[in-house]
Amino acid sequence: MKAAPETQIMLFQMEKRAELLGQEAEQLIYVMLPQKAVDLQEILKSNKYFQQSFIQQLQQQLNEKLLPKTSDTIDMNPIIDFYSEPLPQIYEFEDFVRENIREILKITEQIKAWITVCDASEDQLQYLSDIVTALTQTDDIGNQLIQRILSFHSTRQRLFNKLTKRKLFDVAKTLVQHDIGQVTEIQNGFGELYNQLIIGYDVTIKNFERYRRIPGVKGFEGMY
């Protein structure tokens, strides 16, 4: 029995939608995901925020107010003013890292969204499930890094409030150590994110190829 014209139109639209989603997923998996891994590799290798000189420059600037003075009396007010906010470079560094994490999350979430609409067989589901697991692990590291940036500022504010209240030189030194430690932790976390992204890509491409090789699946016809 021939389907009604309305049903035929709906089926045609669904097929086109599936085809479009499939093309987008293929672009994400074969082009955008590996390209982002290459981008992160280049960032870790040559970007100014991930060079030792960046940390050294921050240390020099932050420690400047803590250098011994000729006078025996230390005026804490200029010190408090100086440390009222993190250095602009730290804000810029955090924004740079956050933007790269958002780009990664956008790619991984789109791939996982495609998987949720796949009409996969039981055999295929295992491969797709492995992809979701690997990409979720990548997402988790990225989100943890963003959370670390947020928690840094709340902890720093508590330290600064303590400095303002007590006006102790040692508290100022602790604040400096906290700022430097934050940058170092983000650098290390970004490297960890890169490593997991490489793992996630490897798992994704291998399982995606296995998914496509299953008999009866040609390209993206397994969708819907």
Image (cartoon, rainbow, N blue to C red):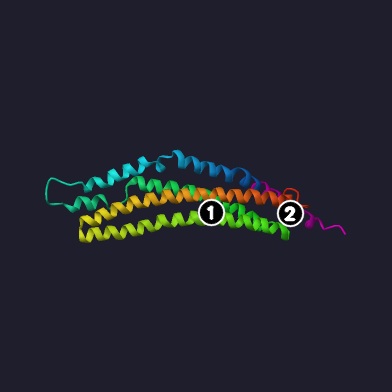
The relative height of residue 209 versus residue 140 in the rendered view (above or below) is above
Could you tell me what secondary structure mostly forms the magenta stretch? helix
Residue under the image location 82 percent in, 58 percent down: 4
Side (left or right) of 68 relative to 133: left
In the rendered image, the quadrant that contains the N terminus is bottom right
Q: Is residue 73 visible?
A: yes
Residue 183: where, in percent of width, then height?
A: 37, 49
Numbered circles on residues, count: 2
Residue under the image location 25 percent in, 49 percent down: 82
Residue 66: where, in percent of width, then height?
A: 22, 48
Q: Amino acid at mark 1?
A: Thr
Residue 155: where, in percent of width, then height?
A: 34, 59
- Residue identified by numbered label 1: 138
Q: Which residues are magenta?
A: 1-24
Q: Earlier in the sequence, mark 2 or mark 1?
A: 1
Closest to the camera, between mark 2 and mark 1, is 1
Side (left or right) of 117 relative to 174: right
Residue under the image location 61 percent in, 56 percent down: 132
